[in-house]
Amino acid sequence: MSVIQALDIGLAVLVLAVAGWTIAAREAFASVVGYVAYGLLLSLVWVRLFAVDVALTEAAIGSGVTGVLLISAVVRLRRTEVPAAAERPGILLRILAAALCTVVAAALAAVVLLMPDPGATLAPEAASHLDELGVGNPITAVLIAYRSFDTMLEKVVLILAVIGVWSLAPDRTWGGAAGPRRIARPEGALAFLAQLLPPLGIVVAVHIVWVGANEPGGAFQGGAILAAMALIVMMARLAEAPEIRRRWLRLALIAGPAVFLAIGVAGFVVPGSFLAYPAGWAKPLILFIETFMTLSIAATLPMLVIGPPDRPPS
Amino acid sequence: MSAATLAGLTGAALVGFGLYGLLTDPHPLRKILAFNILGSGVFLLFGIIARKGAAAGFTADPVPQAMVITGIVVAFSATALAVALLLRLFQETGRATLDPDASAKTPDAGADG
């Protein structure tokens, strides 16, 4: 067994142990902390699968932004934990559930072991048109060119989620500043980090979006980093969360899908079909769409994390 | 055993862990967490499909990878909506339970919505 293999096995054991801890931990807060660690370990597994784009997304969104969302929720729900524990199913039911889950996991494991190698693949098709697009990263090509319809609808899903979250606000707070009221103004480390990190974070995010055309990276990963910078500034209260009735906020939320859709419809005129790019124009158009998508992701994720408004508009 | 197969087996086990948490933990927030672990296990199974589809000079098939990236973002929006619903339930009733008989068992505490 080589060193790399030993590391792989160690990583798999660690991921499963932290996942088990997340499920079994007695306190919900410990469970959430376990989940954040789990997400970071999982992105290492993605690196081992040579899926660096996925690893970046998992680390930024699956672990980072989800972690902020869950930690703030778990703190507010702390006093619901004890009543919930009383509803725990009996030992017999739990053994039955464990047996069922073992069967499901074993069936999936059998599928993994019986999978043909090499398996079915669309990689040659993805590769054959990269030159026409002028894009070097095949995943960006799939996201913004070959399967652009999926990506556009996914942006719509994000907006629907924001509408869903906002519509949970009581009538009297509609239009107010997003998120729960914060009384204390944090000092020290958080305020310092909120001043230090954003300039670096913005540069890193722009770099990740720009290189996304040819290297691992892209609008999702860059947008998530920008969202994290916005969140840390709002958490440190260097800037208050925007009021959800503000027009600039709503324009930022829909800019990505709106530009995507406009270029898609323009495709009817020039190359002749929906979401088709005119020859020679693919790369500039892809970068143009990605820029607005990054803006929308950077606006959407913080709105989803901080939740509906808690006070009336001023 | 290759790194891809090992990751696939990890994904299968994660689906089992997540499903168990989803079924047995009564607290809705823990169910949301378990559901996310279940989801990331499914994503990992996609990862091995991508890796086994390595061809044309790529180390992995880009199509399943792009689908996983889309999936992670959609899973996050679903999680955010679920958490917002749960917090609103707590704000309205002072409880966070999926038990339909809970209001009969305990008096309504701290309703302020």
Image (cartoon, coloured by chain):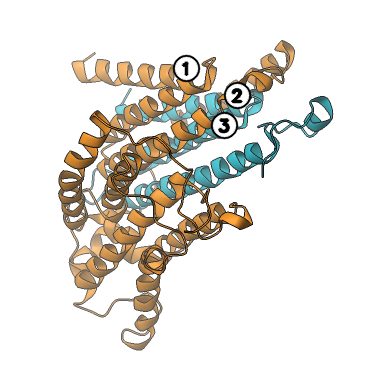
In the image, B53 versus B83, the foreground residue is B83
Q: Colour of chain A?
A: orange
Chain identifier of the cyan chain: B
Q: Label 1 is placed on what type of residue?
A: Trp
Disc marking residue A21: 1
Chain bearing mark 2: A
**Going from the N terminus, do you reach mark 2 or mark 1 first?**
1
Chain bearing mark 3: B
Disc marking residue B29: 3
- Please tell me whether mark 2 sits on a helix, a strand or a loop: helix
Q: Quadrant of the N terminus of chain A?
A: top left
Rendered position, A300 above or below B112: below
- Please tell me whether mark 1 sits on a helix, a strand or a loop: helix
**Mark 3 or 2, which is nearer the eye?**
2
Q: Position of residue A172 (x, y in %)?
A: 61, 56
Q: Quadrant of residue B112?
A: top right
Rendered position, A17 above or below B50: above
- Crowdedness near tag 1: few (<14), some (14–19) or many (≥20) residues, C-alpha within 10 Å: some
Q: Label 3 is placed on what type of residue?
A: Leu
Q: Position of residue B10 (x, y in %)?
A: 42, 25
- Crowdedness near tag 3: few (<14), some (14–19) or many (≥20) residues, C-alpha within 10 Å: many
Q: Residue at left 30%, top 65%?
A: A292
Q: Residue at left 24%, top 40%?
A: A194
> Would residue A264 be found to the left or right of residue B104 on screen?
left
Residue picked out by circle 2: A79
Q: CA distance from mark 3 to mark 1?
A: 15 Å
User: Residue lying furthest top in this view?
Assistant: A91
Q: CA distance from mark 3 to mark 2?
A: 13 Å
**Mark 3 or 1, which is nearer the eye?**
3
Q: Position of residue A16 (x, y in %)?
A: 43, 20
Query: Mark 2 and 1 residues: CB-CB less than 8 Å, in contact?
Result: no
Disc marking residue A257: none
